[in-house]
């Protein structure tokens, strides 16, 4: 077998494992075929993937789609940071490589390629012929393109593909025999070496060179030894359980956030009502204060007017009396005899003296009366807001994950 990422597997155990995987991987709500449909659709073009490639988050896309996506980032955002278009997980910086290089160098989604071959198993027709509006029975499968090929296109494909090593063409019949062919990745550091070893410490496949150099001191075994029972291995069960638990937890957290979001909307309406209510309360209070002050002002004015009137009246009476005395004095001059005049003048003198004393005394006490109101203008200046927004925080509770999560989520599954 000359293909680079396909390798013939030996032993009947693979067939057995194929069956057990079906129950492990199919979701409750989807039939296996629906889940395959879902997995093989490119998130960018919404079609079946062609040359499926995956980012570190394992989300897959057509190689051409991811190239176009990266080119767009470079052109429009003039940024070199690429994040996954589905989950937004940072994938890479592409400052010193072209979009084409980036897409080409991404690892092939081998599982997607396998799923695609299963999908076309019932009616295998050549994808290349279909692109040209023809129908031809497919006989081969390109693992890189994830496409079925007719004899003619298979030959053509083998001859023309410049990066021949990357496009492993196998007979479709062999491809469709469960467990007969498996993808084995090449080392990203040693491009000619297959990942035939496995570091148990870091739970990652590696090439023989990496096994000797980078995993010196680690427990390294052959990949196929680990592979024999991997699907039924407790670590796989733990991983499955951890993924399930985390899925449930994130669903719960999502629902919680959505509920909180809805609650905030309700609280906004409530608070808008309370703000209007508070404002009305202030208005009512200010109306009352205004009324009180106006009444007070009125009362004060009336009281002072009454006082002034009373005083004015008293002075007017005195003024009339003095006018009368003036007339008396003139009359005495003209009509009284001298003796009589002495008596009458004495009486006027006593009254005048008394009045003089009284007027002197009253006039020193007399003050002009003005009305003016002092306003607490500071109140306006110091009241800068009607209220302050309080964020009440309550802990929702710890997300419970089984203790085994850390151990059962090996690095190889994360990247
Ligand atoms: Zn696509
Ligand atoms: Zn992603
Ligand atoms: Zn064809
Ligand atoms: Zn190909
Ligand atoms: Zn290596
Ligand atoms: Zn190691």
Image (cartoon, rainbow, N blue to C red):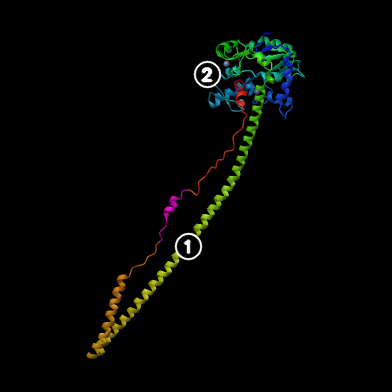
Q: Position of residue 255 (x, y in %)?
A: 64, 37
What secondary structure is marked by label 2?
A: loop
As displayed, is residue 208 above or below residue 257? above
Residue 119 visible, this orientation: no
Q: Position of residue 211 (x, y in %)?
A: 58, 12
Q: Residue at x 36, y 67 (%)?
A: 369
Q: Give the residue at mark 1.
A: 292
Whether residue 264 sits left or right of residue 328 in the image: it is right
Q: Position of residue 249 (x, y in %)?
A: 63, 32
* Mark 2 crowd level (few <14, some 14–19, many ≥20, 10 Å Cα): few
Q: Residue furthest left?
A: 338
Q: Quadrant of the N terminus?
A: top right
As displayed, is residue 288 above or below residue 236? below
Is 383 colored magenta in this rendering? Answer: yes
Magenta segment, which residues? 373-384
Mark 1 vs ligand 2: CB under 8 Å?
A: no
Q: Residue at x 36, y 74 (%)?
A: 312
Q: Give the residue at mark 2.
A: 96
């Amino acid at each position: 077998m000359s293909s680079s990422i396909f390798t013939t597997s030996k032993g009947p155990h693979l067939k057995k494992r194929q069956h057990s995987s079906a129950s492990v991987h199919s979701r409750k709500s989807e039939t296996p075929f629906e889940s395959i449909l879902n997995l093989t659709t490119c998130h960018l073009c919404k079609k079946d993937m062609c040359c499926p490639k995956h980012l570190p988050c394992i989300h897959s896309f057509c190689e051409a789609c991811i190239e176009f996506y990266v080119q767009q980032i470079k052109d429009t955002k003039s940024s070199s940071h690429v994040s996954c278009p589905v989950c937004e997980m940072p994938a890479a910086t592409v400052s010193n490589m072209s979009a084409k290089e980036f897409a080409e160098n991404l690892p092939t989604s081998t599982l997607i390629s396998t799923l695609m071959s299963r999908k076309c198993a019932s009616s295998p027709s050549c994808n290349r012929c279909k692109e040209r509006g023809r129908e031809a029975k497919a006989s081969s499968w390109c693992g890189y393109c994830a496409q079925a090929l007719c004899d003619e296109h298979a030959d053509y494909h083998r001859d023309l593909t410049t990066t021949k090593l990357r496009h492993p063409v196998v007979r479709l019949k062999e491809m469709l025999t469960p467990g007969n062919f498996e993808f084995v990745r090449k080392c990203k550091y040693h491009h000619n070496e297959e990942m035939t070893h496995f570091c148990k410490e870091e739970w990652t496949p590696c090439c023989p060179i990496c096994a000797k150099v980078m995993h010196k001191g680690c427990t390294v075994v052959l990949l196929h030894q680990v592979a024999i029972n991997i699907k039924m291995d407790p670590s796989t069960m733990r991983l499955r359980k951890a993924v399930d638990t985390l899925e449930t937890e994130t669903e719960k957290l999502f629902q919680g956030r959505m509920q909180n979001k809805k609650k905030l909307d309700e609280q906004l309406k409530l608070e808008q009502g309370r703000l209007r209510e508070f404002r009305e309360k202030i208005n009512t209070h200010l109306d009352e204060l205004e009324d009180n002050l106006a009444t007070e002002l009125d009362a004060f004015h009336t009281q002072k007017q009454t006082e002034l009137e009373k005083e004015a009246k008293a002075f007017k009476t005195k003024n009339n009396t003095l006018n009368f005395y003036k007339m008396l004095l003139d009359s005495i001059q003209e009509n009284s005899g001298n003796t009589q005049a002495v008596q009458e003048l004495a009486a006027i003198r006593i009254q005048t003296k008394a009045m003089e004393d009284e007027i002197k005394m009253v006039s020193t006490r007399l003050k002009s009366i003005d009305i003016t109101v002092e306003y607490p203008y500071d109140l306006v200046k110091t009241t800068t807001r009607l209220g302050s927004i309080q964020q009440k925080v309550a802990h929702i509770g710890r997300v419970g994950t089984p203790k085994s999560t850390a151990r059962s989520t090996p690095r190889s599954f994360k990247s």
